[in-house]
Image: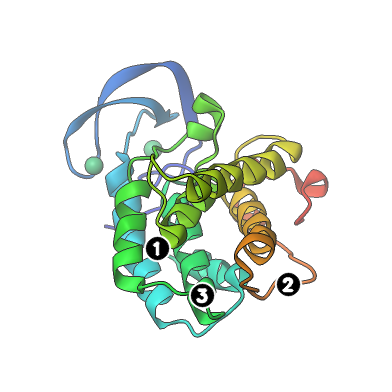
Amino acid sequence: METHKTGCIICGRELQYFQQKKTMRCEVCGVEFESAASCTDNHFVCDECHSRPGQAVITSMALRTPGRNPITIAEEMMKNSIINMHGPEHHYLVIAALLAAFKNSGGYVEMESALSLARQRSEKVPGGVCGFWGSCGAGIGTGIFMSIITGATPLSVKQWQLANKMTSLSLEAISENGGPRCCKRDTLLAILTAIDFVKEKISIEMDKPEIVKCSFHHNNPSCKKDSCVFF
Ligand SMILES: [Zn+2]
Ligand SMILES: [Zn+2]
């Protein structure tokens, strides 16, 4: 299926969000879901159909890259034409880019099983949670990353603290920059925050770029332009 990379993947129109969910049929898999988003022409695509094609690409890039800079790895993933401008696939992308750079920088992680955990957990974080839950999925992604590399569970003490602190620091950085949602900006902010926190707490130093410039704004009609730190 030929898909659009910005807005609605069926027709390219802007998405609209509702306070109350509605029952809608996914244009790709035909299954009915309750959802709070559709395009202005009423197309609805479920999170799984939105994310699944990108997941395989993200996984294979994370397994192959020798890179130590998670921003560069994330940018390469996002440049792949299968990754949409916005969408819940970014929740997995943040974790995968960080896991790869962490391992390549000397961190201990078994990549295949870590990526599998990352997929299982990030799939539970729906699109639009930034606005509806007050918890951007890219920020939650850094907490999932920290939980995976430290082996945190709800009963852990130190690991539990690190995972929750990681999410809170990312959300702080994301919130400081204000809305509207931009999966590129929030992915970059979350990863930059994780680089610093991992260096401080885990003593693994991933490469951090001096300057980050967004190359995706042409495809984002709601880009904040001059008021975005990466413009
Ligand atoms: Zn549409
Ligand atoms: Zn579907």
In percent of width and height, residue 24 lies at 26, 25
Element at badge 3? loop
Where's ligand 1: which quadrant? top left
Mark 3, other Cα within 10 Å: few <14 / some 14–19 / many ≥20: some
Of circles 2 and 3, the one toward us is 3
Q: Which residue is mark 3?
A: 107
Element at badge 1? loop
In percent of width and height, residue 50 lies at 34, 48
Asked if disc 2 is less than 8 Å from ligand 1, the answer is no
- Is 144 placed above or below 102 here? above
Q: Is residue 52 visible?
A: yes
In the drawing, does residue 114 fall left or right of residue 76?
left
Q: Which residue is mark 2?
A: 209
The CA distance from mark 3 to mark 1 is 29 Å
Of circles 3 and 1, the one toward us is 3
Q: Residue furthest bottom?
A: 66
Q: Residue at x 66, y 58 (%)?
A: 197
Q: Residue furthest front?
A: 157
Q: Give the image quarter of residue 27.
A: top left
**Disc on res. 82:** 1
Q: Residue at x 44, y 64 (%)?
A: 96
